[in-house]
Image (cartoon, rainbow, N blue to C red):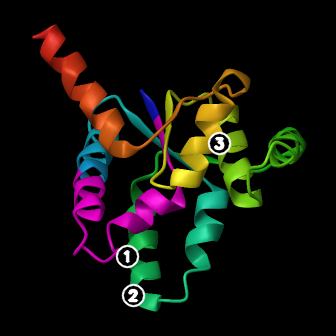
Amino acid sequence: MKIYFDACCVNRLTDDQTQERVVREGEAIEELIGLATSGGDVWVGSVVVEAEIARNPDAERRADAQALLEFVKQVVRLDDGIVARARKLQGTGFSEFDALHIACAESAQVDVFLTTDDRLLRGANRLNRELAVRVLNPVSFLEEVKNAAQRND
């Protein structure tokens, strides 16, 4: 399985852990990163994730997130097709970074693109038939993974 984590997911691990939602998402992301870095799963990243993380003004959080990127097994680089697809997605209401993330995930033919960004999730849900990738919250996806594992037991 190929999993794409956007910068929100990678940064979630260093977000303020006083909110229950942040804790739940952080735990799910940690577990999914573990799955994506062991066995046959592949953590797909991109130069877009790298660029977005590099913009974090908090040096410690930026360094922590960049250290996690060492576990990425495949990095998507921008090309004309990805940029053209991102521009089309921006025309549907996605921000520049979100559109680039989706276009990169589609290009890599990932199984799932994970984000904690509610606005991105709503937009992807609204346009899910036009996207070539599933966009989910990591908590929801981890639940799917666990349910599938239980069915296979």
- Location of residue 39 in the rendering, given as x and y in whole percent from the top left corner: 27, 32
Q: Residue at x 25, y 32 (%)?
A: 143
Q: Which residue is mark 1?
A: 64
Task: Check the image and report above or below for 148 versus 25.
Answer: above
The residue that appears at 45% across and 54% down in the rendered structure is 116
**Quarter occupied by the N terminus:** top left
Q: Which mark is residue 60?
A: 2
Residue 106: x and y in percent read 67, 33
Mark sitting on residue 148 = none
Q: How would you rate the neighbour count of disc 1 (Cα within 10 Å): few for under 14, some for 14-19, many for 20 or more?
A: some
Name the residue carrying label 3: 123
The reply, left or right, for residue 111 in relation to residue 32 is: right
Q: Classify mark 2: helix, strand or loop.
A: helix
Q: Are marks 1 and 3 in contact (CB under 8 Å)?
A: no
Question: Real-space Cα distance between discs 3 and 2?
Answer: 31 Å
In-front residue for pair 60/139: 139
Q: Which residues are magenta?
A: 3-27
Closer to the camera in the image, 2 or 129? 129
Q: Is residue 4 magenta?
A: yes
- Image x and y of residue 144, in percent: 29, 26
Give the mark nearer the N terminus: 3 vs 2.
2
Instruction: Give percent across and percent down for residue 57.
Output: 55, 89
Q: Amino acid at mark 3?
A: Gly
Amino acid of disc 1: Asp
- Does 85 sit left or right of 19 as displayed? right
**Which element carries disc 3, helix, strand or loop?**
helix
Could you tell me which residue is drawn at 68 percent across and 21 percent down? 129
- Quarter of the C terminus within the rendering: top left
